[in-house]
Amino acid sequence: RTLLLRERARTWPQSELPTLNELFEIYRVKRDLRGQFYVMARILEIQPGEPVVTNNVAYLRLLLDEDTEQGHRLAAQVFEGNPKTQAFHSTYALSLVLKKQAGQALELFQELKPETAARTEIRYAHALSLAAAGRVAEGAKHLEGLPLETFAEEEWLLLERYGLHRPASK
């Protein structure tokens, strides 16, 4: 199915964006970050500079270790261009953690509204930032109650790099 959708997106320009969105949803459900990256990178070519898409490309580049320098640049660009859009804090925090600036990443979470701080991607990035700053137990608390089964393998590998572990299988 994904191959057919990729072909349709490539050969039918009038339906490319809806097809890419459909394809992205399939990859999201499968937790296939490489597939998501393929789709988001193509959407960014169609809609250059669109902040949400740019943020997604930055996040995926950083997680997949795919041209991380560009990932860092895009994360900073989106965050600095939209500092009041709290949804971009998580990707920028990820970028800072990977650049060994966990303290600076933690500062981003002090400004968040409670409803934003409760979002899964924000709590993930906050947990990661805490663990990277040596506060692993606090980081683990931020993961409690999250839908951990929705995390992609690459997200788990990054958490584990900083001492946070997957829960034991039931």
Image (cartoon, rainbow, N blue to C red):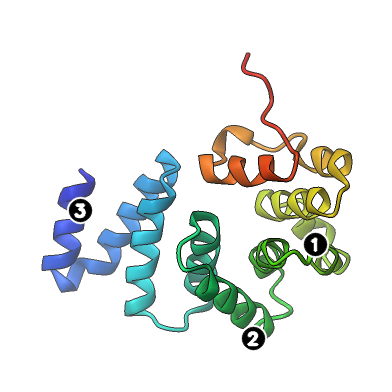
Mark 1 to mark 3: distance in Å? 40 Å
Q: The N terminus lies in which quarter of the figure?
A: top left
Query: For the view shown, which residue lies furthest in the left direction?
Result: 11
Q: Secondary structure at mark 1?
A: helix
Q: Quickly name the residue at label 1.
A: 102
Q: Does label 2 or label 1 sit earlier along the sequence?
A: 2
From the top left corner, tell me how far across and down residue 61 is, in percent.
Answer: 49, 63
Q: Is residue 5 above or below residue 80?
A: above
Query: For the view shown, which residue lies furthest in the top direction?
Result: 170
Numbered circle sitting on residue 88: none
Q: The C terminus lies in which quarter of the figure?
A: top right
From the top left corner, tell me how far across and down residue 161 is, in percent.
Answer: 68, 44
Residue at 64%, 86% in the rendered image: 81
Mark 3 to mark 2: distance in Å? 33 Å
Q: Are marks 1 and 3 in contact (CB under 8 Å)?
A: no
Circle 3 packing at 10 Å, graded few (<14), some (14-19), many (20+), is some
Check disc 2 and give the amino acid type.
Gly
> In front: mark 2 or mark 1?
1
Along the viewing direction, whichever of 165 and 87 lies nearer the viewer:
165
What is the quadrant of residue 146 in the picture?
A: top right
Q: Does label 1 or label 3 sit earlier along the sequence?
A: 3
- Does residue 127 appear left or right of residue 9 in this picture? right
